[in-house]
Amino acid sequence: MSVRIIEFPKISDPRGNLTFVQGYDQIPFDIKRVFWTYDIPGGEQRGGHAYKTQSEVIIALSGSFDIIITDKFGDTTKYSLNRSYYGLYLPPETWRHMENFSTNSFSLHLSSHVFDEQDYIRDINLLSSND
């Protein structure tokens, strides 16, 4: 599976909208960990790594930010997240960093694995060459 935007259900109502995530119906893996980032100072970046085996979906619950995907050849693709009913699916071995955080941005991360420092790839040159 490749990097892609996932659109979640959006139920509109005069009292406000509701969006939900319902396991494998929308997320292509069993969710083992959930974490979020917030209060990112202006100009800062988050990420700058890939995972060996973990898949992840990142959602902008509030505000906006960009996710920059870099392949092992140095080519980049930018995804701008700014709607809480869209998520970005990142399969294993996807190098990413997040930048351009708006004031009060809040990112939700749904992960296929529990935290394991040994699963991190912190040098882009160590990505496999299975293309």
Image (cartoon, rainbow, N blue to C red):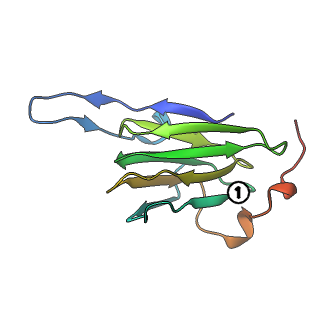
Rate crowding at label 1 as few (under 14), some (14 to 19) or many (20 or more) other CA atoms within 10 Å.
many
Q: Where is residue 30 in the image (x, y as percent from the top left)?
A: 54, 48
* Above or below, 116 relative to 87: below
**Place of residue 89 in the rendered image (x, y in percent of width and height, measured from the top left):** 57, 40
Measuring 65% from the left and 50% from the top, which residue is drawn there? 96
102 sits left or right of 56 in the view: left
* View extreme (left): residue: 15
Query: Does 67 sit above or below residue 26?
Result: below
Describe residue 131's horizontal placement relative to residue 87 as left or right.
Answer: right
Q: Nearer the viewer, residue 45 or 35?
A: 45
Residue corresponding to mark 1? 51
Query: Which residue appears farthest toward the right when viewing the image?
Result: 129
Residue at the (74%, 70%) spot, across then down: 118
Position of 39 relative to 64 (above/below): below
Residue type marked 1: Tyr
- Element type at marker 1? strand
Residue 54 appears in which quarter of the rendering? Answer: bottom right
Left or right: 32, with 105 as reference point: right
Query: Residue 59's spot in the image, x, y percent?
Result: 44, 45
**Percent x, y of residue 76:** 70, 39
